[in-house]
Amino acid sequence: MGSRLFPSAWLDSSWRWRSLAVPRDAAAHLAVWGAALVVTGAFTWIVADVVGHGASHLSLEFLTAAPADAGLSGGIAPILVSTVLILCVCMAVAIPLGLGTAVLLAEFSRDANRQGRFVRRSLDVLAGLPSIVFGLFGYAFFCHALGLGFSILSGGLTLACMVLPILIRSVEAALRALPDEIRATGAALGLSKTTLIRSLLLPAASPGIAVGLILGIGRALAETAALLFTSGYVVRMPNSVFDSGRALSVHIYDLAMNVPGGDGMAYASALVLLGLLVMMNALATELVQRWQKRKGLLLV
Amino acid sequence: MSDEPLRPSLERWLPLQQQAECCEPHPLVRAQELSLRYGPTLVFEDVTLDVHEGCITALVGPSGCGKTSFLTCINRLTDLIPGARVSGNLRLDDVDLLDPQIDLIALRRRVGMVFQKPNPFPLSIRRNLCLPLKEHGMRSRIARAEATERALRDVGLWDEVKDRLESPALALSGGQQQRLCIARALVLEPEVLLMDEPCSALDPLASRVVEDLIVGLRGRLTVLIVTHNLAQARRIADWAALFWKQDDAARLIEHGAVQQIFEAPKQELTAAYVQGRSC
Amino acid sequence: MTAETDAAPRRDRALAAILRITAAVAGSITIGIVAYLLFGSLPALRAIGPLRFLTDPSWNPVHGAYHIVPMLVGTMVVTVGAVLLAAPLAVASAVFGRFYARGILSRVHRRMLETFAGIPSVVYGLWGLMVLVPAIARVGPPGQSVLAGVLVLALMILPTIALVGDAALGAVPESHLRGAAAAGLSRWAIVRSIALPVARSGIVTGILLGTGRALGETMAVVMVTGNVVQVPGSVLDPVRTLTANIALEMAYATDAHRSALFVSGLVLALLTIGLVATIDRIEGSERSDGTNAHGV
């Protein structure tokens, strides 16, 4: 953790000159710095572009009004509502499944038994599958086989499948990071595993769990392809999770590709989406810091 | 940071007669030809030892000689280690501790354990003690409060923490934390207390406080304490057992009354070890 | 902690049972996905037959033609191009962050990469569409092209490769580096001869992860590659990837057409599973007992 670089203790300034004297070293130096500049430049360009073009359309009205003229004017209120609903459905399903699986993997099957191995391997694969494949699955299973049709529910359930591996990984890592002494002490006191998990392990791991949740939400927010033909395309304000609804990311896509002249609004929507993600990131960082401070206390 | 009261320095060596006085040699925990393996590795072999009721027994010997492992057999913490196999005979009173069918929860109520590094739960002081009580069935909040106060008084912490029972246990000093861990073990009123080098992570002052505490337990319960500090063993124990690694596995070399072990050891090895370190 | 089976109180056994159920559900999602892809593909495989996907004259499902090769080529070209472009830049970035940047700069650099790893693909696509495509159009219309796809995808996968590479470089034992410095090697010599080789498997894993991400990317490529079904003649030609194909046609496809789309989905899933298995094996070969990265 943290930036481990060449401490100047064993690389004094003479080395630095020496490192430039040889042409190959100078070239490498140039290449590495150049790469860093190119990368930074490209990303700054993207962000600046989105902020620059989107800020002009951003306003309170934008966030609270409904889209009009196929999205060319008005706002994104129903879309924000749909997005939030999709996220809620996603989390409502992913959290119990994710917590349960992670607790099983971390506390009940440390020795590599068959179920643990199978679950881990399949989660690895799940994490790598393309989002469009999730879309196909969601369409075939949730929309058709379960008969939910194009709905926020279908979209949320599909996203839950995508978010599950991330959530499980984070929670499992958080539980494994807890010192084993807690478990040994708990056993020595005759505490049942249930009490150990519920009263000691989960509370102690809660910052890590929260970080996992936030990462999952971030991934869900950014997802588009899986929602295209599961949650629907409709811009109306949804009445329930059984209605179809359009997520923010899908709205950006639609404005950019299907609506002539819709790029201004697309930029504004993209700015809102980025803003939400930045907030999530900041929250996660804050929690990680708090977790590390707590860890310091734990390992006293 | 430490707010432990300064105690007047006690005699380094209490006369050994005083120590053995209230101790009747009646075995409570009996090990016969006990051996422990972690998978293919033999940890200790053929240990035959009687731990006498109401007395303080010290397990001494260099590190890595199976003393802690022996301790973990008695409360079956070996079950937590995959591949651990215990063979031989181990009884607490008339209960066969190696029987896979015994109620482990009840066993761990009768046999408490204190670990080397103080490890209170990341909860409040009060909850550290009430959690085990609640788990073992004490439903009444008043009863729990009384038991908590009793245990904290036993370890000499009550006056220090009575006003801040809800504060985090991890905020206590090292010595206080270890006393809290002892209180946590005592609150269940065990018959046997296993202690794995309870003072090794503490500074000398805190260490003495804990030692006094242990001595105060004599007669009330049976204490089995692992220590590699011979002076400490001599100070507080009634009985001593020397573990040593021979032929790749730890063995029990000799055990007997502390006076006999230190002044008239029967084995060469014991004599060498005891004289080499106890100056 | 092994489960204490016989002596465990009933509560623990009930908890274990519940947890096993949740884990079983989580574990069976992957199987479910592959299963539904298969069910969805079967009609096409039966009615059309796998050979025709390669030999039909064109992709024109309405008229019963299912030539998938141009889209396969599209996917491959765009993916490989993106990886070829992104990998060196990403590794150089990682080297920069670990060995050439100082304190705060290094932290800022890493934070920046982490932020960009989270930018949604539609935002990349939007920028590509609004900025990159017109720029390319000035050189050679229409602008939406292989080149645009490669550039956008490269930007998308760069943070992933760089962050994994950064972690791998950070895991190089400091003793190695110190020893090399003491022997008089220059900074670049140390990186080249010690750090990079030691971190190699981690970096390769990062590149494979990036490849997987590029392979499966949909929205960004839909927005910038033009979506014309053809084998591209040059980098300025528009092209359609498998993923884009599914995204565009799923809305109105029926019966055999829809089933054909499921076939391409199945192909994508299998390719990804292959990548994951390779990554697993690489991380596993680092351990002497052949267990994978999870120790199983």
Image (tube, coloured by chain):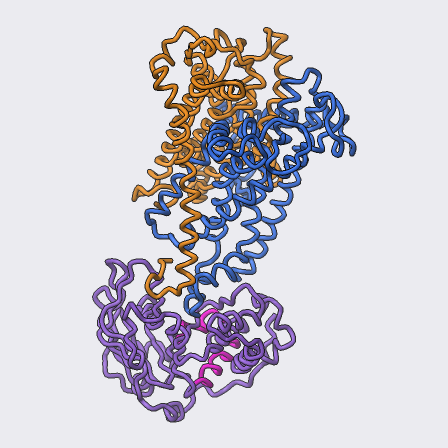
Chain colours: A blue, B purple, C orange
Left or right for A249, reference B209 = right
Q: Is residue C95 at all visible to an observer of this figure?
A: no
Asked whether C177 or A233 is in front, the reply is A233
Up-down: is B85 above or below B187? above
Up-down: is C125 above or below B59? above
Task: Please provide percent x and percent y for residue B29.
Answer: 31, 80
Residue A199 lies in the magenta stretch: no
Task: Please provide percent x and percent y for residue C294.
Answer: 39, 44
Left or right for B212, reference C13 = right
Left or right for A95, reference C34 = right
Image quadrant in which you'd find residue C40: top left
Task: Give the magenta part as a residue range.
Answer: B194-217
Up-down: is C26 above or below B147? above
Residue at 55% of width from left, 86% of height from top?
Answer: B8
Task: Please provide percent x and percent y for residue B94.
Answer: 29, 81
Residue at 61% of width from left, 19% of height from top?
Answer: C128
Residue at 30% of width from left, 43% of height from top?
Answer: C288
Residue B210 lies in the magenta stretch: yes
